Image (cartoon, rainbow, N blue to C red):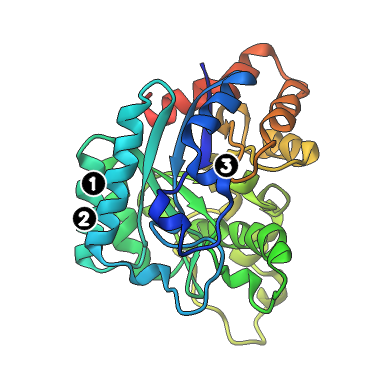
């Protein structure tokens, strides 16, 4: 069974008020298209809940009422029930949500139709090293639930980008890089070593930044004093040593990025992910890149299915 851990679908009522790719509403078409290339199961969710991934004036994805999110998750659970061989789903959560929001997200996960959470790598300009995210990470740790770290509609790293194409392919890529890096630097993997964090977008550029993260932890330019020292990070060892505790997907058309992730994270921490829908057509290039990796067939099978089965307990 080949498993895609990164796909999105949206209910019909979300398609009318918001500009969204039509592929998001065609669940049978997605299943048929993926079966044609050998992908039998897709883990779907929404990084905006019932909101809009395309920035819309006056729409605040983080202000969605509980009853609206509950209705959205009921729809997602219904899609899984209708396609049990081909779909699993994720609960959307705001990592800075209030007690009611987080309690509702936890209960939705406990109800059994979901296999993890999806949250944003930045929220209204705030990154995940903010201590206020601690309640969410404590909850995810207690539930032993995987968490997909996904760029938001309006990423902090995309501030100033007015062309939506640049926002999609540059701003969100950079937001994943910074947001997941902030998860490491914020000490969440230190405090909750059982956390199961998945960096989407192939982890952004994290595979290239291990040494840069360590320079944040121990900046040599301040080692001899002469400047105001920064407060210590909540880590007991260099940040690069926590990277192997992360998972990354393959949702990037770059074979070079995939090879770098193989070196930094390891074949046992890479998950097949296409971001399709909405990126229809990404399935074949991603599968070809995995087939082209210089690894034993056992490792390719792990990336295609075994790692996802283990992480999501499928």
| Residue at the extreme top of the image, as rendered | 297
Q: Nearer the viewer, residue 92 or 65?
A: 65
Residue 27 appears in view: yes
N-terminal label among 3 and 1: 1
Q: Quadrant of the C terminus?
A: top left
Horizontal side of residue 189 vs 206, given as left or right? left
Q: Where's residue 68, x and y in %?
A: 27, 60
Vertical arrangement, residue 15 with respect to residue 82, above or below: below
Mark sitting on residue 28 = none
The reply to whether callout 2 and callout 3 are in contact (CB within 8 Å) is no
Viewer-side label of 3, 1: 3
The reply to whether callout 1 and callout 2 are in contact (CB within 8 Å) is yes
Q: Which residue is mark 2?
A: 104
Q: Where's residue 149, x and y in %?
A: 49, 52
Mark sitting on residue 108 = 1
N-terminal label among 2 and 3: 2
């Amino acid at each position: 069974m080949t498993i895609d851990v990164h796909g999105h679908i949206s209910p019909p009522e979300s398609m009318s008020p918001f500009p969204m790719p039509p592929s998001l509403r065609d669940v049978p078409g997605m299943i048929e298209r993926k079966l044609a290339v050998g992908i039998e199961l897709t883990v779907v969710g929404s990084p905006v809940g019932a909101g809009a991934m395309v920035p819309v004036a006056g729409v605040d994805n983080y202000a969605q009422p509980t009853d609206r999110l509950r209705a959205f998750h009921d729809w997602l659970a219904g899609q899984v029930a209708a396609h049990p061989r081909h779909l699993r789903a994720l609960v959307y959560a705001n990592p800075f949500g209030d007690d009611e929001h987080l309690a509702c997200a936890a209960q939705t996960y406990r109800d059994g139709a979901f296999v993890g959470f999806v949250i944003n790598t930045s929220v209204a300009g705030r990154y995940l090293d903010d201590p206020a995210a601690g309640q969410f990470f404590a909850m995810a740790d207690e539930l032993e639930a995987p968490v997909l770290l996904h760029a938001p509609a309006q990423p902090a790293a995309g501030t100033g980008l007015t062309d939506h194409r640049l926002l999609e392919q540059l701003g969100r890529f950079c937001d994943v890089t910074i947001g997941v890096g902030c998860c490491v630097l914020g000490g969440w993997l230190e405090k909750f070593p059982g956390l199961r964090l998945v960096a989407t977008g192939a982890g952004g550029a994290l595979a290239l930044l291990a040494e840069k993260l360590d320079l944040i932890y121990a900046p040599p330019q301040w080692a001899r004093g002469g400047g105001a020292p920064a407060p210590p990070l909540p880590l007991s060892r260099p940040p690069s040593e926590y990277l192997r505790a992360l998972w990354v997907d393959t949702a990037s058309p770059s074979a070079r990025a995939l090879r770098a992730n193989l070196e930094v994270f390891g074949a046992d921490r890479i998950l097949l992910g296409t971001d399709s829908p909405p990126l229809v057509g990404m399935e074949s290039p991603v599968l070809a890149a995995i087939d082209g990796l210089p690894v034993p067939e056992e490792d390719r099978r792990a990336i295609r299915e075994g790692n996802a089965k283990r992480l999501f307990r499928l």
